[in-house]
Amino acid sequence: MSARHVASRWTNAVLVCRKCSKKLKGGGFGPDGDKPLAKALRKHLHLGKGRKSHAGIIEVGCLDICPKHAVTVIDTRRPDRWLIVKPHADLDALARDLGLAGEP
């Protein structure tokens, strides 16, 4: 059986540790500090979910870093450089660091 291809509009993908996000009570991100990082970042950048979005922000299982009071994030364009993001982080600065700034 050969592999099948499915088109996507993504320019890059960001992996966010779901376990780290769940450990933060109340989410910790967004204007009110009540959203998980993946959801807050998607909303802040006006990205939808799924392959028709301009970038993918995907929650994944435990990444085995487990920082206290923070979330582990991987930019798939730079897999050798993982980020530890604290609650109430500046989402504009994070988006620039992840190469997501300026996305439509």
Image (spheres, rainbow, N blue to C red):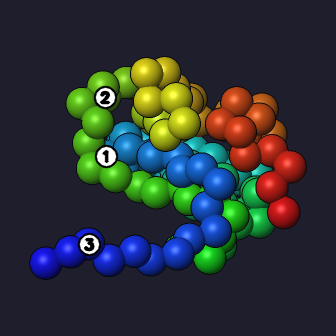
- Is the Cβ of the residue at disc 1 closer than 8 Å to that at disc 3? no
Q: What residue would you read off at disc 1?
A: 19
- Whether residue 38 sits left or right of residue 59 in the image: it is right
Provide residue 65's location: percent of width, then percent of height: 30, 25
For the C terminus, the quadrant is bottom right
- Please give the name of the residue rendered at 45% of the width and 46% of the height, measured from the top-left corner: 15
Provide residue 36's location: percent of width, then percent of height: 52, 54
The quarter of the displayed image where residue 23 is located? top left
Disc 3, SS: loop
Q: What residue would you read off at disc 2?
A: 66
* 27 or 92, nearer to the observer: 92
- Is the Cβ of the residue at disc 2 closer than 8 Å to that at disc 1? yes
* Mark closest to the chain's N terminus, 2 or 1: 1
Q: What residue would you read off at disc 3?
A: 3
Provide residue 59's location: percent of width, then percent of height: 41, 55
> What's the CA distance linking mark 1 and mark 3?
31 Å
* 1 or 22, nearer to the observer: 1
The 10 Å Cα crowd at callout 1, few under 14, some 14 to 19, many 20 or more, is some
Disc 2, SS: loop
The answer to whether residue 63 is seen in the rendering is: yes
Q: Which label sits in the foreground, 2 or 3?
A: 3
